[in-house]
Image (cartoon, grey):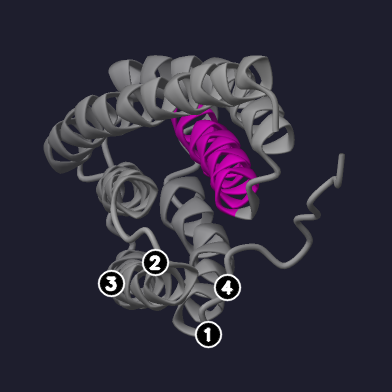
Amino acid sequence: MSESTILDRAAVAQRGRKLEYFTITWNAIEGLLAIALGTTAGSISLVGFGLDSFIEVMSGAALLWRMSVDADEESRELNEKRALRMVGICFLLLALYISYESGTDLWLRRAPEHSVPGIILACVSLAVMPILSRAKRKVGHDLNSLAMQADAKQTDFCAYLSAILLVGLVLNALFNFWWADPAGALVMVPLIAREGIEALRGEKCSDCQVTQG
């Protein structure tokens, strides 16, 4: 491998680390806002979205850790599986929490308050996540990194949750469909549970491919 190629890969890897630092910072702020807004409005979908953001912080931190430690392949693979399983447990606990809370809200007909700030937060997240995912996917392609490509897929997953959250909040705000918020939260559950199961199995990504160059 030529010196210029090594330098190019180092630059791409540095860009990947910057993307992960941005992801961690973004999700931490997003999570705090979503939980605060959701608690104020009594919105289980907002609270669940916020908790998911903190799990994404853990996932991003785990990826940074995997990028910075373990020179030999065997140790790196073992640490990666450990990190994935820890994140997977968190995802499954979140799915159980959302199922219980949203089911209780529907049973007791507890109507959340309207949350315009929550709608704005969902819109901003829905705009940012696809851009961030494309940037991560490019880095993953340039580095032939399955881990980075998997993280890009997880960022796509965040965009899906943002869209579900937005629909529920808007239906409640415009039409007083009180059930839209807990129903939207329930729609998140199978997506979150699937991520958790895949992580527990040690699967980085079910359909990520590495391009050989």
Secondary structure, mark 3, is: helix
Q: Earlier in the sequence, mark 3 or mark 4?
A: 3
Q: Which residue is mark 3?
A: 97
Mark closer to the observer (4, 2): 4
- Type of amino acid at the residue the image marks with label 4: Arg
- From the image, tell me which residue sits under label 4: 194
Residue 93 % position (x, y) = 29, 76
Quadrant of res 109:
bottom left
Q: Is 90 above or below relative to 39? A: below
Q: Which mark sits nearer the N-terminus, 3 or 1?
A: 3
Give the amino acid type for the residue marked by disc 1 in the picture: Arg
Q: Is residue 122 above or below residue 196?
A: above
Q: CA distance from mark 2 to mark 3?
A: 14 Å
What residue type is disc 3 on?
A: Tyr
Residue sitting at 29 percent across and 70 percent down? Answer: 90
Q: Residue at x 52, y 52 (%)?
A: 184
Q: In front: 100, or 31?
A: 31
Tell me the tag on residue 201. Answer: 1
Whichever of callouts 1 and 4 sits on the residue coming sooner in the sequence is 4
Q: How far apart, in angstroms, are the residues tagged by discs 3 and 4? A: 15 Å
Q: Residue 211, located in which quarter of the rendered image? A: top right
Quadrant location of the C terminus in the rendered image: top right
